[in-house]
Image (cartoon, rainbow, N blue to C red):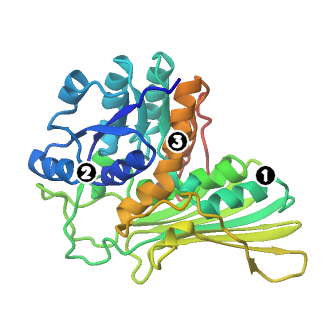
Amino acid sequence: MATKQLTVGIIGLGYGRAHIAGFQAAGVKVLALCQRDTVAAAKLAQQYQVPHVFGRWQDMLDQARPDIVVIATPPVLHLPILKAAMAVGCHVVCEKPLATSSAEAQAMMAAAAAAPGLAITGFNWRFAPAMQRMKQMVDAGHLGRVFHVNARWFNPAWADASTAPTWRMDRAQAGYGALGDMGVHLVDLVQWLFSPVAKVVASSATAHAGRTLPGSGRPADAEDFSHVMATLESGASVAITVSRVARGLNEHSLEVYGELAAMAMRQTRTGENWHLGELLAAKGSALFEPVIITPSHDGAELSRDRLELTGQSTICPMVQQFVAAIESGRQATPSLQDGASAQAVLDAVLESSGSGQWVPVAASAA
């Protein structure tokens, strides 16, 4: 007997547009779109053949009643939306960072634990084909004991001082800057692949002192770049660099060096097959050589639009795994616990950026 087609409502249509493509590719009906600018939302609804548009997320929950809710709003809204959605029986995909602080992330976990639905954190870059292959090799013991890891995420989005600021520059709305935009993915990948982060030391800064927040004269206060040194519970050392003012690059990468071998993953945003990612491996005294990466889309036609392609290649497999968890009742991943664990690292990084000292990472409650 065929299972009922699930429906989804997507709140926030910036990065939320990638979720439209991802959910549609996964066979989930996109039932409703929601954002304050309903004119722009209606245009997207027409483009993607979505039947309902809302300006208020409360109205979407009350009237559309989707099975799944995607929260792709500024992080300051994640907690109230998740609590309301799960209280009425929805499953939730919450974008990263999970919240604006570890305290809020803990409150989200508590709300989810008290509700019948399932919830996950949108760590979609776990599902890129090169990263999936890297995970398989790590779990198979390819590296042996891990010595050190280098990770970075660079893009040039706000390199120009004249580029219009957004809520992402406002710590009150975003919680973090480049760390929340990009660094949180690297933290998750490191912890997913290797071991929890035990302590950090970091420095962070904004790039343009004259940049002010939209609608106010207050200076932008969310970091544009950050350098983080970390020690994992396993004893391995990690270096993470994130920047949204890095001219000439739009990519993320992760290198790991172990007792038996080394691996290097790179996910650039250019070229025809960028969504697959690149993976290199070296064993013994040999130099790095390419590892064959198998596409995950089974020959399906893919978009040339980068945001849509991100949805089709990384969000789609995440959604497929989530739907399988919903249908079977098993635990869903990437979990809210994963999001809260990464959040605790970000909070420690912020504290260290202010003090210049090593800061232990607080354990997040299971």
User: Which of marks 3 and 1 precedes in the sequence?
Assistant: 1
Pick the residue in front: 238 or 108: 108
Residue 353 appears in the rendering = no
Single out the mark in the foreground, 1 or 3.
Answer: 3
Q: Is residue 335 left or right of residue 223?
A: right
Residue holding disc 1: 139
Single out the mark in the foreground, 1 or 2.
Answer: 2
Question: Horizontal and vertical percent for residue 90?
Answer: 38, 24
Q: Secondary structure at mark 1?
A: helix
Give the residue type at disc 3: Gln
Question: Horizontal and vertical percent for residue 134?
Answer: 70, 61
Identify the disc placed on residue 48: 2
Tell me the distance, in whole angstroms, between the alpha carbons under discs 1 and 3.
22 Å
Question: Horizontal and vertical percent for residue 34?
Answer: 21, 40
Question: Horizontal and vertical percent for residue 233?
Answer: 74, 47
Residue holding disc 3: 320
Give the residue type at disc 1: Asp
